Amino acid sequence: MMKQELLRVETDERGVCTLTLNAPARHNALDGEMVNLLLQRLQAIAKDETIRVLVLTGQGDTFSSGADLHWMRAMGLEEEETNRQEARQLAALMHVLNRLPKPTIARINGSAYGGAIGLVVCCDIAIATVSAEFAFKEIQLGLAPAIIAPYVVAAIGPRQARRFLLNGETIYGMLAFQMGLVHQVEDREELDGAVEAQVSRLLKAGPLALVECKRLLSRLEPGGESLREYTAELLARLRSSPEGQEGMAAFLEKRLPRWRD
């Protein structure tokens, strides 16, 4: 698959840019290439004064299955600095999306797992199909949702985060709405209309006021570069650990992990 096909970019005459994760054969999983493409595109959008609203979605029936485990496992076997740098790129992606000076809408066309939930909660508005499922499966793979945890906690609160990040259970659409993971759930045929309604509201606002409001919200958030570095280092360390390697191998080989005693 060519690079430009992995991420489809469409901008209409109103300045509404839609980014579509376009790897449906692998459930729009995030690997190093997809992460870098997303990061580069978001950095360009941040500087593009013609773009007023960003919509992020996935191609097919899945929003994104999260980090590609083949990539994650391979990175865990790389030299330490290479492993860390890849983790930093993922951390940078979430940071740039979260701080993008344009309003962002996650159009969640299907289920989202692991790192993909980070994309959801880093968007300003999240609208999902009622049938969408969400889960933090990292813990079952000998990993932790390190990069996305600060953003998830900001979205759903520390109490809910303790339960769902530690046990990896599935969060169904209506529960995701009730706990604040998404703002709205709709039947699939109503999803586009719901997204368009939010886009229309945002386009009625003053462009400069939107930018300044986003900056205001960013200043109110806790954390910073030291936290991002910590989460990147933690991800790199866990995916290179024997437990992380075993957990990912077990999943890919469709067997139970053999955890060390």
Image: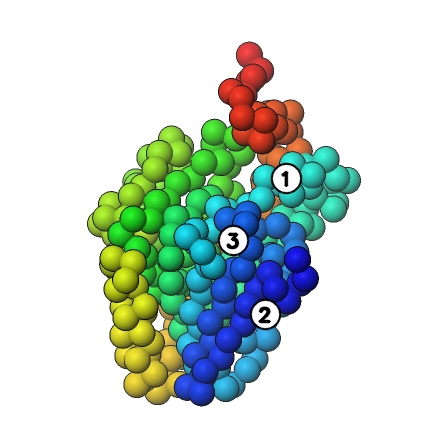
Q: Please state which amino acid type lies under the numbered disc 1.
A: His
Q: Position of residue 35 (x, y in %)?
A: 60, 57
Element type at mark 3: helix
Out of 110 and 158, give the one closest to the viewer: 110
- The numbered disc on residue 70 is 1
Q: Position of residue 147 (x, y in %)?
A: 52, 48
Circle nearer the viewer, 3 or 2: 3
Query: Residue at (47%, 76%) from the top-left corner?
Result: 17
What residue is pinned by disc 2? 41
Identify whether 15 is placed above or below 154: below
Task: Tell me where residue 175 sits by quadrant.
Answer: top left
Out of 240 and 129, give the one closest to the viewer: 129
Image-based side of 5 in relation to 203, left or right: right
Circle nearer the viewer, 1 or 2: 1
What residue is pinned by disc 3? 24
Q: Position of residue 195 (x, y in %)?
A: 32, 69
The colour scheme applied to this rendered structure is: rainbow
Circle nearer the viewer, 3 or 1: 3
Task: Note whether residue 104 is visible.
Answer: yes
10 Å crowding of disc 2: few (<14), some (14-19), many (20+): some
Query: Residue at (49%, 64%) from the top-left corner?
Result: 20
